[in-house]
Amino acid sequence: MNTTLKKPRVVIGLSGGVDSSVSAWLLKEQGYDVVGLFMKNWEDDDDSEYCSTRQDWIDAASVADVLGIDIEAVNFSAEYKDRVFAEFLREYSAGRTPNPDVLCNAEIKFKAFLDHAMTLGADFIATGHYARVRSIEVNGNTEYQLLKGLDPLKDQSYFLHRLNQAQLSKAIFPLGEICKTEVRKIAQQLKLPNATKKDSTGICFIGERPFREFLNRYLPTKPGPILTDEGKEIGQHTGLAFYTLGQRKGLGIGGVKGYQADDGTADAWYVAHKDLKNNVLYVVSGHDHPWLLKPELEAEDASWIAGYTPALGNYGAKTRYRQQDAQCQLVSADDKKFTLAFEQAQWAVTPGQSAVLYDGDICLGGGIIY
Ligand SMILES: Nc1ncnc2c1ncn2[C@@H]1O[C@H](COP(=O)(O)OP(=O)(O)OP(=O)(O)O)[C@@H](O)[C@H]1O
C-alpha cells in the first residue's frame, strides 16, 4: 500500500513582482506543491515603452527557476477586454471613475485564473495580496471571512471585497501576516533576481502611460464650459469623462485665481461636480469647500462576502484605497444597494469608485458609489 500523502497543490499568480515571488517561496516552505501561473491580460500595442509584460514574464520565469517550481503562461486578454475593460469604458463614458483592479480580482484573478488553475489540478490558488482569509463555523456551516492584511500600509482587502465564499474557500494569501519590509528582506536573502524591483503602480493595463491620452484613444473629446460654484465660466473642459471628483491638476485654469486669503495666497481649484446633462464641469476653490464634502453616500451593485447582507449599525468604511476607515452607519442595505451615513463628512466621494465596509479588521464587502 502506498502511504505517501500527496501534497496539496497551489497555483500561484506569479507576476514577476517581489510579492508573489516571496509568496511562492513561503508556500513551498509550508510544504505545498507549488506551480506558478503568469497571466497576460493586455495585448501589447504600439506603446511598448509603457508595457512591461515581456520583462515581467522574464522575471517570473527566472524566479520560478530559482525556486525550483514549474511555471506556465496563460493569455486572458480576451476575457479581460470583455469583462473588465468594456465595463471600465462604459463607466468612464457615463462620467464615472471606475476601479478596474477591483473588477480584475473578481473576474480574472479569482475567476478565469481560478478556473484555469483547477484544470492544472489545483487544490488552492494564491496571490501576493496583503490580506487574510479565516474560516469560522456559523450554525454548523463554514463561513470564509476576508480580513485586512496586518501591514497597515499595504492592506489590499479593499481590492478584494467583491470575492465570494466559493472564491475565498480556494484562496491563500501567504503575505497576510507579514510586512512589506520583511518581504523585501526575504527576497534579498533568497537572492531572487527581482529582489529590488520597483513595485508596480497604477492600473495594470495603463501602467505609467499618460492617462488622458490613453483614454482619449477610446473615448471622444466633448468640450464644454468649466463653471465655478457661483456660475462664472473660467475655462473649457475637453470632455467630462476625462476628469474626476477632487481633481486639482490638469484643469487648464491655472491662470485664474481662486479664493484669495488676506495674505494674498490663492486657493487651488478642484473638480466638484459633473453636470452630464448640460456637459458642464463645476469647480470650487479650496480643498475644504462644502461641495467636496459628503455626509452620506449611496452605493449600488452590492457584493457581500458572507453571501448575506450585514445587519444595519456602526461600521468603518473606505471610499478609496489607502484611506483610514471612516466611522459610519449602515442605514439601509440589501443585496443590491446600501446607504452609509458618516460621522464626519467625507472628501470627494467619487461615483464609480468602491465603498467598502469593515467590521474592525473584517471586510464585509461593498458596492459602487453612485
Ligand atoms: N500578470 C500576472 N500574472 C500572474 N499573477 C499576477 C499578475 N499580476 C498580478 N498577479 C497576482 O496578483 C497579486 C496582486 O497584484 P498587484 O498587481 O496588486 O501586484 P503587487 O502587489 O505589485 O504584487 P507583485 O509584487 O507580486 O507584483 C500579485 O501578487 C500576483 O499574485
Image (tube, rainbow, N blue to C red):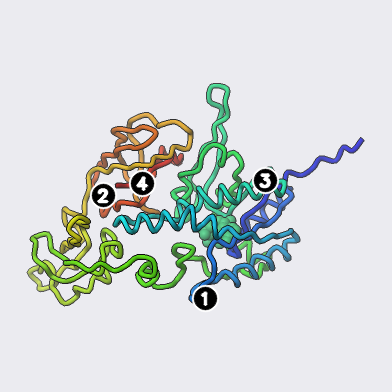
Answer yes or no: do the residues labelled 2 and 4 have beta carbons within 8 Å? no
Residue corresponding to mark 4 = 368
Ligand 1 shows up in which quadrant of the image? bottom right
Residue sitting at x 8%, y 60%: 230
At label 3, the amino acid type is Met
Going by the image, does 146 lie left or right of 272? Answer: right
As measured in the structure, the alpha-carbon distance from the residue carrying label 2 to the one carrying label 4 is 16 Å
Amino acid type, mark 4: Ile
**Residue 357: image x %, image y %?**
38, 41
Q: CA distance from mark 1 to mark 2?
A: 39 Å
User: Answer yes or no: do the residues labelled 1 and 4 have beta carbons within 8 Å?
Assistant: no
Quarter placement of the N terminus: top right
Earlier in the chain: of badge 1 and badge 3, it is 1
Which residue is rendered at x = 61% and y = 47% of the image? 114
Residue topped by disc 2? 346
Q: Secondary structure at mark 3?
A: helix
Up-down: is 337 above or below 292?
above
Q: CA distance from mark 3 to mark 4?
A: 30 Å
Earlier in the chain: of badge 1 and badge 2, it is 1
Q: Residue at x 10, y 72 (%)?
A: 263
Taking depth in this image into account, of 55 and 223 the one nearest to the observer is 223
